[in-house]
Amino acid sequence: MKKILVPTLIALAIGSLASVAQAQTAPAAAPAAAPESTLAYNVGVISDYRYRGISQTRLQPALQGGIDYTDKSGFYVGTWASTIQWIKDAHGGANVELDIYGGYKGTAGDVAYDVGFLRYEYPSNNLKPNANTNEVYGAVTVGIVTAKYSHAVSNLFGFTDSKNSGYLDLSAAVDMGDGYSLTPHIGRQNVSGKGNGIYSYTDYALTLGKDLGNGLSASAAIIGTDAKSGSYVSPANKDLGKSGLVVGLKYTF
């Protein structure tokens, strides 16, 4: 906004009349453009694929990648894949996880929300019950804090009679400046069904991220769980939920 100072009341009056005339004849300002829809791709490598604190790759590295489409209305769909090992270790055949998801993100006042559906697909797996899993989820974010709940509407990852299992997690996104971020997280996985209580646990993580520019980012995380001894182990009897350092590199374009 420009302020014009003149030495006399006459000049001020003339300026005011000119401004009124201009406002009456100028066209109305165009409304702000809606945000554009986006299509984004990502590829990465990680030293150990941990999902809800449990290693999916027998504590070994994984290759990962995905595609996300976000509509300007708030609706989104995407798919993401990773190499895995746990189903082969259980003699189930599959060595890839493919996630397919869709949902809607919006805001209500100072609260951001996200609701959606997620399908975990393990192509060609022959576990009994089948490892393929369907979940619905909802999340709310206030400031830097996000709370999310995921509810299984099928059996959960091959556990017998585990429909209605749930996962609740709480995290925060702390901007440390200069491209660094810090994300503390705690979650609780409940596995429903008779005899499945041994597989319920709490997981935690503290992740340091760094935006390296040009779509490249790096991360280092301390991840662990309190899973009961013997509940999640490799064929060599290694604890897949033990605390450890996980590092990763991702490129988004």
Image: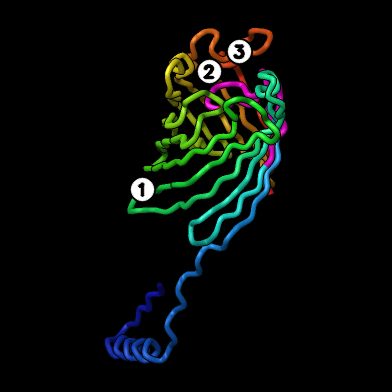
Taking the spot 41% from the left edge, 30% from the top edge, the residue there is 168
Which is nearer the N-term, disc 3 or disc 2? Answer: 2
User: Where does the N terminus fall, quadrant-wise?
Assistant: bottom left
Question: Where on the picture, by quarter, is residue 145?
Answer: top left
In the rendered view, would you say 100 is above or below 200? below
The x and y percentages for residue 84 are 68, 27
| Left or right position of 155 against 147 | right
In the rendered view, would you say 12 is above or below 94? below
Asked if disc 1 and disc 3 are in contact, CB closer than 8 Å, the reply is no
| Left or right position of 83 against 54 | right
Q: Which mark is residue 224?
A: 2
The stretch of residues the image draws in magenta is: 46-65
CA separation in Å, label 3 and label 2:
14 Å
Question: Where on the picture, by quarter, is residue 47?
Answer: top right
Between circles 3 and 2, the one closer to the viewer is 3
Q: Which residue is mark 3?
A: 233
Taking the spot 38% from the left edge, 78% from the top edge, the residue there is 4
Q: Is residue 169 visible?
A: no
CA separation in Å, label 1 and label 3:
40 Å
Label 1 packing within 10 angstroms: few (<14), some (14-19), many (20+): few
The x and y percentages for residue 110 are 34, 50
Taking the spot 49% from the left edge, 50% from the top edge, the residue there is 103
Q: Which residue is mark 1?
A: 111
The x and y percentages for residue 77 are 57, 51
In magenta stretch: residue 18: no
Q: Name the amino acid, label 3.
A: Val
Question: What kind of element bears circle 1?
Answer: strand
**Camera-side residue of 2 and 134:** 134
Which is nearer the N-term, disc 2 or disc 1? Answer: 1
